[in-house]
Amino acid sequence: MIRIIDLHKSFGPKDVLRGVNLTIEKGETMVVIGQSGSGKSVLIKHLIGLLKPDSGEIYIDDVEITGLDDDELMRVTRKFGLLFQGAALFDSMTVAENVRFGLERYTRLSEEEICKRAAESLALVGLNEAECLMPFELSGGMKKRVGLARAIAYRPEIMLYDEPSTGIDPIRADAINDLINKLKNDLGITSVVITHDMVSSYKIADRIAMLYGGEIIEVGTPEEIRNSSSAIIQQFIHGQAEGPIKDW
Amino acid sequence: MANLSPNALLLGAFEQLGAVGWLFFKTMKNLFRRPREHHTLLQQLEEIGVRSLPVVSLTAAFGGLVFGFQTYTGFHRYIGPGSETFAGPIITLGLAKELIPILVGLMISGRVGSSMAAEIGTMKITEQIDALHSLGANPIRYLVVPRTLAAFFMLPCLVLYGDIIGILCGYFYNVVLMGVNRVMYVQNTLMYLEIWDVATGLIKSCVFGVVIAIVGCWQGMETEGGAEGVGRATTRTVVISSISILILNFFISKLLPASLKGG
């Protein structure tokens, strides 16, 4: 379970997070929606310790992570898989080396098991033929899928997805949505998905949280969010330029 | 910059010094921790050592030639014909203790330090360093430790190699080109040269290696703002490490004893 309590983060004079409170249950898929620049990626980076908050607490399975030192944090971090918005593949390594990276260093799996795990992960994202390619030889969508294969190869307990459907065609995006659902159903993975793609949100979310003005203004099931009385949420989910959200 | 007060500039300088000191501390802390990145270490040993041989050869050769030329001219003009045989120890001492370590340090900071900053800077702006972290890898252990170790071990090797090339070129200019007595030249060189003179240069080069790697990695990890930021990081790396090498060279020269024979 993940608990975020009163999380604040500023960059210079800009307050990005102004007291975020959110609880994500084990095995649940929580989708965090919000405008571009609203702090969704900043929020996700706090969960994995890439950013330190100005104040507030984050509990991962009852361990408060904001005060941990590097090595303790690394141990907690290994529970996570993160799919980056831009895939963030290691560009000096092949696809297979990217996927095997964490397995070779931080598991006691044999060479044979590592190869099998990497092949399985690539097969899950439909890229089993791409093992020997370098990242510069891949399209944007393929990079994203390799990034996903790399993240799930480690069999994380918690998956964080930063804009999983951005930059790929709707069919591939839907395939990734199916994959997120499959990982949740088959492996019981807890997922936090950052997106502003409402079609994907409705398909994968157990609950949706709206981040606006540095705070979570509403959390609910897809149905509750669809029927929300909040004018801000209605403007966002219907993608309307007119409404209470002016700062676009 | 023009609007910054002296206090703000001083504070900024101390902040930067603190940041690089902290990176050095964390690198030392992670030096012997597992997993060890043998593959990256080997890659860096090759990159810093083997691939720098051509540039070190050229630098040392022309350094040795020009030093040989000036020393010969000095003895010939001010002390008189025949005294040039004493150019040998002067050239050897000057090259091994000062010139070659500095020249190699400056060349490596330009060739390797800048490339470290560019590579790590690009990894930073494309979130590859965050990806390392997300995979449970410690970026210091994976990126900084192997580079620092490789530079620490390879700089002395390059300096020793540069010493040999430079001394041979100084000999070539004096003995082969200018006809200085070969036996006297070699005899004087061996009489006055101590192993400690060469060791002084090697000790300096170990320090320069660590400085180049730490500054390159630090600037890479501090990179912000896309391609322009990477360009700034590489320039800063060369400037900061070159200046540090020149300053440190003076202090190490002052700190280390001139000779181990006493006096």
Image: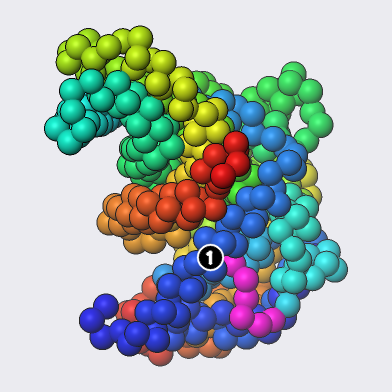
The picture places residue A94, in percent across and down from the top left corner, at 50, 27
Q: Which residues are magenta?
A: A51-56
* Quarter of the figure with the C terminus of chain B: top right
* Quarter of the figure with the N terminus of chain B: bottom left
Name, please, the residue furthest toward the left: B77
Which residue has dot 1 on it?
B19
- A85 drawn magenta: no
The reply, left or right, for residue B205 in relation to residue A116 is left
Q: Nearer the viewer, residue A146 or B250?
A: B250
- Against A232, residue A184 (above or below) is above
- Against A174, residue B4 (above or below) is below
What's under tag 1, amino acid-wise? Ala
Question: Image quarter for residue B63?
Answer: top left
The picture places residue B228, in percent across and down from the top left corner, at 27, 56
Q: How is the image coloured?
A: rainbow
Q: Nearer the viewer, residue A99 or A215?
A: A99
Callout 1: SS: helix
**Residue drawn at (46%, 27%), measured in percent from left and top?**
B192
Residue A189 in sight in this render:
no
**Residue drawn at (79%, 23%), measured in percent from left and top?**
A110
The reply, left or right, for residue A225 in relation to residue A59 is left
